[in-house]
Amino acid sequence: MSGYPLDEILHPKSIAVAGASADGRGAGFVSPLIELGFRGKIYPVNPKYAGQNIMGLKTYATVREIPEPVDFVISSIPATQVLGLLDDCAAKGVKGIHFFTARFSETGRPEAAQLEKEVLRRARAANIRLIGPNCMGVYYPAWGVSFSEGMPKQSGVIGCASQSGSAVHEIVEMARQRGCYFTKAISYGNAIDLNECDYLEYYAQDEDTKIIVMYIEGVRDGKRFFKSLRRTTLKKPVIIIKGGRGRAGTRATASHTASLAGAMEVWHTAVRQAGAVEVSTIEELADVAAAFYFLPPVYGVRAGVVGGSGGSSVMGADQCEEAGLDVIPMPNDIREELKKRGSPIWDWISNPADFSIQMGDSGSGGDITLLMGEHPDFDLIIQYLSPPHSWGGRGRPVLPIEEHLKHSGVGAIKKPMFIVLQDRGRSTSDTTGESLRKFNEFRDKLVENRLPTYPTIGAAANAAAKMVAFYQNRERAIAAACL
């Protein structure tokens, strides 16, 4: 552990679940702890089930009655009961509480807002730190902590802080689909105690976290947040999605987590000046995170595009340029090398390299990929790629995956590669699921080779451009700091 204050509550040796029951959300907090293999002791708490077992664990009437020490409490009880819970936690020496409990200031009701203030007052008097209220809490796979069943057990290098509980579920799942995993993901809701600044600063110093992603609806302390963000982006990429960008979203934000959504023009400027990467959807957040997750830094925008055909190549070039990449002309020395190899298309192959012109054995996609990947004029490569089973029934053998990748030139290039993963062979009438299984197997092999995959060239180009912009901005900020 780092010694940072958050570390103490994120590494509990025992967790009590207040409001645990045989079914419902309370049981849902006990079950994922068991499923993910929490290292310490779990204590269900509910006076209705006192003395009984919930999921094989003895249940207690109150936290105060648990005979052993309790480090952390998950509250799944009504808001009207939380002050009593806080008193019990104070008497027990609890270090942190996650309040799944909602219906506080987000309701807009004065009495609920006042209750929230009293919760914070009592917590501070007892030296208890709070996550929430109105949030899903902590997902920490290496420590066996989770708030939902089915969360990945595998750890990675992404740290997530999300004001929304549903958003953190989506972020974790979409990242998993791209082969990316988390050190920790924390949903923090109303943030009456620990807020986005605390989580950002924690991840900034956490050695296991290499990439930070955030879903933010509003900030409690703008000056502190952007100062911390500027310091953090000098060390690690920070990818941010802002909820409540429009008028309707702003109204929804107020009823969701009681945040004050700021003017978007000010927000965009501040995020850009702080050097963070701003995205507009969770899909885009996952796409950009995958680029940072698998690839080394990219500092140039000169892109080589391999594959596609006909109109898709033309549109691909447009989308790359619209994203901010430079689809440079094919270098003459590559043409000359193709000519030496006897390629019949050496004089008219271009960038993007259009596969519809039938390059043949002497000018295969692998040849083009390798030549572009080795050429100093290209900073990155975007390649269209299909799984080997996609070509079945077309008079070509279905190659083993490794041989297919080698034939396509993948794996032999040191430059950053963004894969546009196509599946021409998938059939909607495939009731066996075999096509999907083979597609996933191929995608997993690309992930093993540390290659991010994207459904479209637009998504790949956007991720590449945002990655380049981050590293260019960081270079300028570091240079300016040295003046």
Image (cartoon, rainbow, N blue to C red):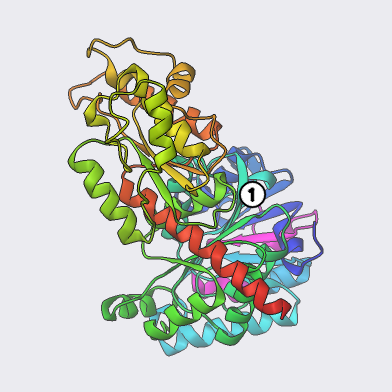
Q: Where is residue 81 in the image (x, y as percent from the top left)?
A: 55, 72
Residue located at (46% from left, 16% from top): 403
Q: Which of 167 and 316 is in front in this view?
A: 316
Left or right for 202, reference 430: right
Left or right for 266, reference 236: left
Q: Give the range drawn in magenta.
A: 59-85
Kind of residue at badge 1: Thr
Q: Quadrant of residue 471?
A: bottom right
SS of the residue under disc 1: loop
Q: In this view, does 230 lie above or below 265?
A: above
Q: Position of residue 380 (x, y in %)?
A: 47, 47
Whether residue 440 is visible to the viewer of this picture, yes or no, is no
In the image, residue 29 lies in the stretch drawn in magenta: no
Left or right for 195, reference 66: left
Whether residue 266 is visible to the viewer of this picture, yes or no, is yes
Q: Nearer the viewer, residue 339 or 37?
A: 339
Q: In which quarter of the image is residue 70?
A: bottom right
Q: Please identify the quadrant where the C terminus is shown.
A: bottom right
Residue designated by label 1: 59
Q: Position of residue 417 (x, y in %)?
A: 48, 41
Q: Is residue 347 above or below residue 380?
A: above
